[in-house]
Image (spheres, helix red, strand yellow):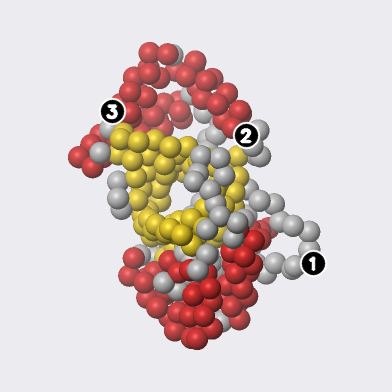
Amino acid sequence: MKRTTGLVFLLAFCCLDPAIRGDQDPAAPPLPQPIYLMADIRVEVAKAPDYEAAMKALVAALRENAFPVRFDTYSTDDSRYYVVYGLEGYAGVDSLQAAWRDAAARMGAGKFQALHGRLTASELERVLRLWTFRTDISYLPAPERLKPAEIGYYTWDYVWLVPGREAEFEALNREWMALSKAKKSRDPFMTYQGGIGTDEPVYVWFEYGKSAADYALTEERFWKSLGDAGAALSKRTRALIRKMETKTGRYRPDLSYAPGR
């Protein structure tokens, strides 16, 4: 996460079920591990307004045709758009594809292809990746410092590991969880593990704040509270990472879709 300057963070997809928040009892049954499909779309900077206009037109068409699947969209500060779908297991990919085929049929092939063409005209790259939300190696305090409506800034810290070091990395995540709890941190970090479509082994830490300034201030306070223990744990974590990349951005409700809204 960003806390690999201290810790490591990431990707989320916002409002988590209260059932998977709070203290996790090691003796309790394993928590569910939600799976997400993320479309990582890189857009030509000059064409970003065109791309967003096309996305809004698509959302409107989906609403008119009662598309049954929710997706949430985030825009990063380097001209990427993350479109995220929650899946009910890996079989959910088939259900999602069927839903899109049905939507295209209801709209009519001509209209659907026209909308699709408006989007791809602004795209430089589109990659589909599956991520599993690892609730067992995420820190999910209750209550959090921020309410969902207060969140305005997100960070994704992607960490590619030295192959074969996954078990060590996950054990260190649990140490980060314990240390965060001991220091009474109220800011979560959510850990996602990359699957199909990713360059494995890769994880991402998802964190957020009110703003970039709020996030930076919170991180500074967090690291000061950890002291030497945090520095030592950070060093051990970094030893397992072969490459790291950080993204920052915002949730885009205007480019997101939920059935019935």
Residue 87 lies, in percent from the top left, at 60, 39
- Residue 131 is situated, as x and y percent measured from the top left of the image, at 55, 46
Tell me if 176 is positioned left or right of 26 in this view: left
Query: Residue 254: image x %, image y %?
Result: 37, 42
- Mark 3 — residue? 121
User: Which residue in the rendered view is the most extreme toward the bottom?
Assistant: 228
Picture residue at 52% right of the left edge, 58% below the top = 162
Q: In front here: 257 or 34?
A: 34
Give the residue at x 61% y 28%: 94
> Residue 119 is drawn in which quadrant?
top left
Q: Quadrant of residue 125?
A: top left
Q: Residue flagged by tag 3: what amino acid is it?
A: Ala
Which mark sits nearer the N-terminus, 1 or 3? 1
Nearest to the observer: residue 68 or residue 43: 43
Q: Which residue is mark 2?
A: 92
Task: State if disc 3 and disc 1 touch (CB < 8 Å).
Answer: no
Q: With respect to residue 174, does 166 lie above or below?
A: above
**Mark 3 secondary-structure assignment:** loop
* Separation of residues labelled 2 and 1 (CA atoms): 30 Å
Apparent side of residue 2 relative to residue 86 in the rendered image (left or right): left
Is 231 drawn above or below residue 15 in the view shown?
below
